[in-house]
Amino acid sequence: MGVPDSQQPTTFLQRVAYLISRHQQDQLTTGEAEELRAWLDATPENRRFMEQWNDTRLLADKLQRYSQPDVNTAWEAFRAKHLTDANLERAPRKTFRLTWRHWSTAAAVVLLAGTAWYVQRSRPAAPIAQQQEQAPVLPGTSKAVLTLADGSTIQLDSAGQQVIAQGAASIRQQNGQLRYDVQNPDAAPALNTLTTPRGGQFRVILPDGTAVWLNAASSITYPTAFREGNRQVSITGEAYLEVTSKANHPFQVRLNDQTTVDVLGTSFCISAYANENTISTTLVSGAVKVNTGSTSRTLAPGQQAQISNGSIRVSPTDTAAAIAWKNGEFYFNNADIPAIMRQLERWYDVHAVYEGHIPARTFQGEIQRNLPLEDILEGLQSTGIRFHMKGRNIIVQP
């Protein structure tokens, strides 16, 4: 049986999937082989994309999840039947549960379920070179910039291997991590800053053994050696810390002129992005005291403090959700579209542009952060929200 026109591989991802599926079965024509080779040679990102989607066991697992019932489809049918454009804004907010089955991508489905009908008398889409859609936008990687006290900068990535001598410290870069070792306790400490760009993350082991994971678009400023008294660092953006306990040497994180977090030996997460409405501190273990202005609150494990307009609100929280980014996942907890877009902007180094009214919807679920951006957007599109990419802009349409 031929393939219906509605199922032809007409999009960029489908064309790539078509070629990869043909390659996996050794059925590429000479022209298709040249087309696939040219696409792979065009950019390192294209090669990474093929390697990721060439794992058939991964795709089989995703296909199984993808085939489960989709509650979002039912909601969309209800929305189309019962809501009009005039009363949509007044409708109750709808929460969508987006688990793996909703986030499996067209590329994965094409490579597995679609292989049979793509390779059997199907009419392939126009060659990639003739299509206008852009190459996949890939996720962030381990990269950062180390700014030394003298203002000089060092670019860091996951592959770098080097040792930097700086006054009291020896700084070793290895496998996407910096480690500080104090070599001369009598030397005056200097202040360094580690900064991750959009699309980057990094880990640093401070001179006292405290481990810090920085999320995208974040920074930490710290001394190359901690002397007597308080151990103090300054953080912007988002970070997860595992603080080494030292009697009589409390650890303090400064977030801005008004807000600090006093720490004993503990594990916790801080989110202090300038474009978010609140500053949050989530305690995993130990104890912390959150201070803003003249107000202070002490947290117990499993609690989160949210700071807004000079006040502190403490509530129970899911600590696994707060540190999901550290473990390689997005976690959306009743997140609206702008909240999701802000996470995507930071991790994929893109910009969201809104055209018209933004649907009042919230989303609940998690997804790995190692997927191409197109995968995430296809998952959201399954709920009826429309997107398209233009350069590095995500155009969000009503």
Image: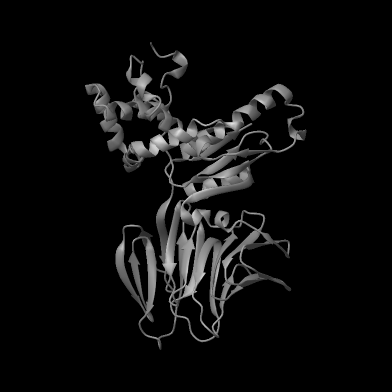
Q: How is the image coloured?
A: one colour
Q: Nearer the viewer, residue 85 or 134?
A: 85
Q: Is residue 291 above or below residue 309?
A: below
Query: Residue 140, can we see it?
Result: yes
Query: Residue 135, can we see it?
Result: no
Tell me what residue is drawn at x 34 percent, y 39 percent: 55
Q: Position of residue 99 (x, y in %)?
A: 54, 40
The C terminus lies in which quarter of the figure? top right
Q: Position of residue 229 (x, y in %)?
A: 54, 85
Q: Nearer the viewer, residue 374 or 119?
A: 119
The N terminus lies in which quarter of the figure? top left
Tell me what residue is drawn at x 42 percent, y 62 percent: 145
Q: Nearer the viewer, residue 334 or 310?
A: 334
Q: Which residue appears farthest toward the bottom when viewing the image?
A: 186
Q: Which residue appears farthest toward the top when viewing the image?
A: 1
Q: Position of residue 238 (x, y in %)?
A: 54, 60
Q: Which residue appears farthest toward the left when viewing the image?
A: 30
Q: Is residue 133 left or right of residue 34?
A: right
Tell me what residue is drawn at x 42 percent, y 59 percent: 144
Q: Position of residue 312 (x, y in %)?
A: 72, 64
Tell me what residue is drawn at x 51 percent, y 87 percent: 228
The image quadrant of residue 306 is bottom right
The image quadrant of residue 384 is top right
Count all numbered tags in the image, as a single digit.
0
